[in-house]
């Protein structure tokens, strides 16, 4: 006579062999890199940019989200597909195909932009900690030490798990937006076309400049490199490329789903009441009179979590890129001694960012707008290599870009170049 344990074991074996369960296990096996990369775009610098956009421009800036989401999904899918088919990261392929000089130029540009982003994330952690009655300097030191220990002493699986758990905290922005009691009809309507404000020349100028910041914080050069490297480090089997492709579009939707609520929370409270915002963490204080104490606190907790996620992911991106660009060992599944340079670069960025933030007078507002604008202006070059590589039949075989991917990405690149030039001109021209 079979025991209950034997019966349950036999039934589990039947379920485990079913097609539905097999698919679920494959999805769980590949899940992580694209979602984490996309969500990390909503780091503290990103939250600051979205908050400033909502407070300065109101609901019409939401129109950009729909287009940006599609472009984010398409380009990150290219990066994941490139890595899974070639078994190499984007940075590795750039070095192999275009030479060491190009690799050096790309790495230096990435290092500068990433360092600015990390400094911005650290600044947000410092300020938000003080708002939550946590001593800011000890908070920065703890963040550096804790981050370095868990990354060097852990492995890929642990890092991915912690990052995925961090994604759950973004629900705080949804709650904050709902508590702000926005005009949902106006919010959703602006996803289709911008309306509901007086489009003066000054407003249009700010829309373009801040809009470039929104683009630069959502679709980042570091994100294109990180999603490639993180997917490679996960060692996803090429036969599961379709599942990874689906995850990239899910990740793109998820990141801008939360971005939508960040903008709605500030647009419905600050823009509608004519309150000027100069930093992301200031938003958590400014919305309290309109949305309540809890909404403001949740917004602050969200920024603190976003800052942590940002410094981990962006620092790892630089370390991954350096290792690939210059052919060195770099993996979360290797020890400190095996990948010493990889971990030193990771730690070095954290220390530099923390030290800069220990000096008084660091302006997160200026740093965020400048860094995200640099990111947006650097995107066309990254897209150039990404599109060229994924169009290469010798590399990709039957997995080259389809017509929609190719033309949408190229059109997006051209638009970004034109907008970048216009932004530079308008930055120095008074209207």
Image: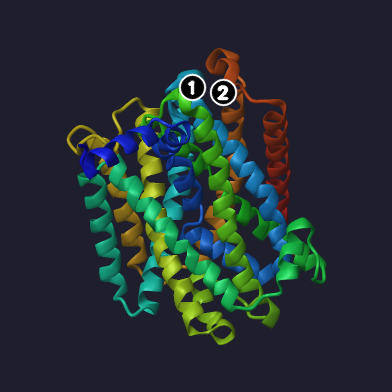
| Image spot of residue 174 (x, y percent) | 55, 67
- SS type, badge 1: helix
Q: Quadrant of residue 388?
A: top right
| Residue 350 position (above or below residue 392) | below
Q: What label does residue 85 carry, if any?
A: 1
Residue occupying image coordinates x 43% and y 59%: 168
For this rendering, which residue is in front, 49 or 77? Answer: 77
- Of the 4 image quadrants, the one containing the N terminus is top left
Mark before the other along the chain sequence, 2 or 1: 1
Q: Using the rendered image of the protein, determine whether residue 217 is visible from the camera's viewpoint.
A: no
- Asked whether the beta carbons under mark 2 and mark 1 sit within 8 Å of each other, the answer is no
| Image spot of residue 377 (x, y percent) | 61, 45
For this rendering, which residue is in front, 275 or 106? Answer: 275
Which residue of the protein is positioned furthest toward the top in this rendering?
394
CA–CA distance between discs 2 and 1? 11 Å
Of marks 2 and 1, the one in the foreground: 1
Which residue of the protein is positioned furthest toward the left in this rendering?
337
On the image, numbered disc 2 is attached to which residue? 389
- SS type, badge 2: helix
| Residue 253 position (above or below residue 77) | below
Q: Quadrant of residue 10?
A: top left
| Image spot of residue 68 (x, y percent) | 65, 48
Which residue of the protein is positioned furthest toward the front in this rendering?
1
Q: Label 1 crowding class (10 Å Cα cut-off): few <14, some 14-19, many 20+?
A: some
Q: Label 2 crowding class (10 Å Cα cut-off): few <14, some 14-19, many 20+?
A: many
Residue occupying image coordinates x 36% and y 73%: 129
| Image spot of residue 335 (x, y percent) | 20, 37
Position of 336 compared to 387: left or right?
left
């Amino acid at each position: 006579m079979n025991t209950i344990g034997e019966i349950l074991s036999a039934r589990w074996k039947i379920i485990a062999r079913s097609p539905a369960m097999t698919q679920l296990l494959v999805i769980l096996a590949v899940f992580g890199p694209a979602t984490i990369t996309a969500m990390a775009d909503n780091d503290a610098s990103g939250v600051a940019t979205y908050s400033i956009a909502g407070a300065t421009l109101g609901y019409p800036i939401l129109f950009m989200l729909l287009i940006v989401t599609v472009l984010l999904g398409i380009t990150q899918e290219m990066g994941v597909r490139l890595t899974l088919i070639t078994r190499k990261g984007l940075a590795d392929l750039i070095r192999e195909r275009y030479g060491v000089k190009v690799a050096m130029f790309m790495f230096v540009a990435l290092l500068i932009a990433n360092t600015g982003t990390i400094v911005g994330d650290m600044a947000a952690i410092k300020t938000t900690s003080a708002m939550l009655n946590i001593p800011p300097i000890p908070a920065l030191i703890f963040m550096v030490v804790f981050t370095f220990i868990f990354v060097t002493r852990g492995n890929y699986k642990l890092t991915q798990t912690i990052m995925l758990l961090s994604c759950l905290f973004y629900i705080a922005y949804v709650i904050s937006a709902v508590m702000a009691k926005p005009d949902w009809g106006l919010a959703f309507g602006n996803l289709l076309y911008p309306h509901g404000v007086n489009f003066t020349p000054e407003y249009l100028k700010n829309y373009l400049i801040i809009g470039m910041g929104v683009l630069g914080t959502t679709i980042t050069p570091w994100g294109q490199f990180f999603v490639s490297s993180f997917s490679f480090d996960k060692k996803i089997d090429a036969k599961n490329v379709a599942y990874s492709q689906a995850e990239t579009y899910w990740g793109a939707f998820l990141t801008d789903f939360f971005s939508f609520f960040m903008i709605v929370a500030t647009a419905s409270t600050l823009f509608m009441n004519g309150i000027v915002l100069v930093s992301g963490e200031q938003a958590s204080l400014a919305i309290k009179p309109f949305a309540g104490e809890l909404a403001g606190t949740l917004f602050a907790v969200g920024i603190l979590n976003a800052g942590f996620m940002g410094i981990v992911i962006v620092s790892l991106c630089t370390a991954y890129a350096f290792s690939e660009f210059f052919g060195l060992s770099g993996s979360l599944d290797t020890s400190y001694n095996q990948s010493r340079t990889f971990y030193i670069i990771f730690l070095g960025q954290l220390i530099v960012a923390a030290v800069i933030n220990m000096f008084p007078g660091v302006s997160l507002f200026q740093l965020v707008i400048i860094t995200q604008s640099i990111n947006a202006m650097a995107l066309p070059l990254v897209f150039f290599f990404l599109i060229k590589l994924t169009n290469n039949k010798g590399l990709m075989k039957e997995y080259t870009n389809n017509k929609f991917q190719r033309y949408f990405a190229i059109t997006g690149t051209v638009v970004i170049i034109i907008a970048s030039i216009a932004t530079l001109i308008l930055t120095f021209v008074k209207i």
